[in-house]
Each structure stands twice: as C-alpha cells, then as structure tokens.
Image: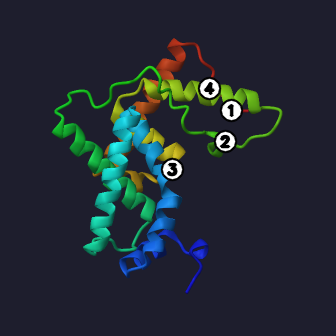
C-alpha cells in the first residue's frame, strides 16, 4: 500500500471510499486550512465559517459514501464547489439580502499572499504593503467578485474550475473578474494607492 504522503488527494478520496478511514484523516489535514480560509473570505464571520466548514465536510463524507465522487478533476475544486453550495444554502435559509456583512475585525489578513508573489529581500516591504492594500480593496468588493478574485489569485484555480465550483458559466466567472478588477482599480485610484509589485 502506498504511503499517504505519496498519494494525491484524488487517490486518498478513493481510498477512503474503499474503507480506509486514515486516508480521510490525511485528506482533511491537507485541505482544511485552505478550505476554511476560502469560506472565511466569503462570509467574513469566523463562527459562521466554522459552521459552514463542518457542514461542508459532513456533505463531503456523505457524497463520498454514496459514490458521488469521481476522480476526474481536482479534489480541491470539487471540495470548493460543495463549500460554495453550502454557503449559498446558508444564505438562502437565513434570507439574507446582503451576502456578506463585512466585519471590522476581518481584513483578510488571515491568509498570506506571499505564495502569489515572487519575493526577494530588497522588495519584501513594498510587496507586503501592496498585498495589504489588495486585501483592503478586496474587502470593498461585492461577495461574488471577492470570491472569484480569491479563487483565481489565492487558490490559483482556472476560470473553468471557478465556474464549476460556483455553478456558473465561464463567461460569468470572467465577467465577475473583469468587474472586480475594474472596481479594485477605481478604489485604488480613489484612495491614491500604487499597486505595483517589485
């Protein structure tokens, strides 16, 4: 049997379906931080994010047990799709008109942008400031635009994967990104921010 560390997420999921509970433990360990960060980025409330995270993994387990997972694409994209649906269900159930209520204590600093940047010692300070500004601008975006920016730049998903995860067409995903970038440019201009990475 392969060591878990050498197995892909897709192989771990299939191993769990075949009855290996330790495979799921490894899968959870690998994916929980990134998934929770995604959920928190969308909902901006840690308690709600915890609830949605737990419900997402309950649905993942149920779908795996019912054979509703096929290793055709990335497991992470499948996972994000389930989380997205749980978030949308939660908002429908609570009949919220505004998808996200921005909390004053959540400025997206809970995830790092360092992995998005090519960094070196001379420009680390400038890049840190730019990423801080980008997080602030993201907070000002409507929820659907913030979600697509996060998925594209921080989770590095393709527009096809974003479309699948959010249940919209690729053109809709591209449109949301376009409007998000236009809004971020406008906000940067209004706040006189320079967003040039060194």
Q: Secondary structure at mark 3?
A: helix
| Cα distance in 3D space between marks 2 and 1 | 8 Å
Of the two numbered discs 2 and 1 in the rendering, the one whose residue sits closer to the viewer: 2
Mark 2 burial class by Cα count in 10 Å: few <14, some 14-19, many 20+: few
Q: Earlier in the sequence, mark 3 or mark 2?
A: 3
Residue at mark 1: 197
**Which disc, if any, is residue 118?**
none
Is residue 60 something that shows in the picture? yes
Q: Secondary structure at mark 1?
A: loop
Mark 3 burial class by Cα count in 10 Å: few <14, some 14-19, many 20+: few
Residue at mark 2: 117
Residue drawn 55% across the image and 39% down it: 111
Mark 1 burial class by Cα count in 10 Å: few <14, some 14-19, many 20+: some
Q: Earlier in the sequence, mark 3 or mark 4?
A: 3
Residue drawn 42% across the image and 38% down it: 40
Does 99 sit above or below residue 82? above
Residue drawn 42% across the image and 72% down it: 13
Residue extending furthest toward the bottom:
1
Residue at mark 3: 33
Residue at mark 4: 195
Q: Earlier in the sequence, mark 2 or mark 1?
A: 2
| Cα distance in 3D space between marks 3 and 2 | 20 Å
Are the residues tagged 1 and 4 within 8 Å (C-beta)?
yes
Q: Is residue 140 left or right of residue 5?
A: left
Pick whichever, 86 or 157, lies toward us. 86
Residue 164 found in image quarter: bottom left
Of the two numbered discs 2 and 4 in the rendering, the one whose residue sits closer to the viewer: 2
Are the residues tagged 2 and 1 within 8 Å (C-beta)?
yes
């Amino acid at each position: 049997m392969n060591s878990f560390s050498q197995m892909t997420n897709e192989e771990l999921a299939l191993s769990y379906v075949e009855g290996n509970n330790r495979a799921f433990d490894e899968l959870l360990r690998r994916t929980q931080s990134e998934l929770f960060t995604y959920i928190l980025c969308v909902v901006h409330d840690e308690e709600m994010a915890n609830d949605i995270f737990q419900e997402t993994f309950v649905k993942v387990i149920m779908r795996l047990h019912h054979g509703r997972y096929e290793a055709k694409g990335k497991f992470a994209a499948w996972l994000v799709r389930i989380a997205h649906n749980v978030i949308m269900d939660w908002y429908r159930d609570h009949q919220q008109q505004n998808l996200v209520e921005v909390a004053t204590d959540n400025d997206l600093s809970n995830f790092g942008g360092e992995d998005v940047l090519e960094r070196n010692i001379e420009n680390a300070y400038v890049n840190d400031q730019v990423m801080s500004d980008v997080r602030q601008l993201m907070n000002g975006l409507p929820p659907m635009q913030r979600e697509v920016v996060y998925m594209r730049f921080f989770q590095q998903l393709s527009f096809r994967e974003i479309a699948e995860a959010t249940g919209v067409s690729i053109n809709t995903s591209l449109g949301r990104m376009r409007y998000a970038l236009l809004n971020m440019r406008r906000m940067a201009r209004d706040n006189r921010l320079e967003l040039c990475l060194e």
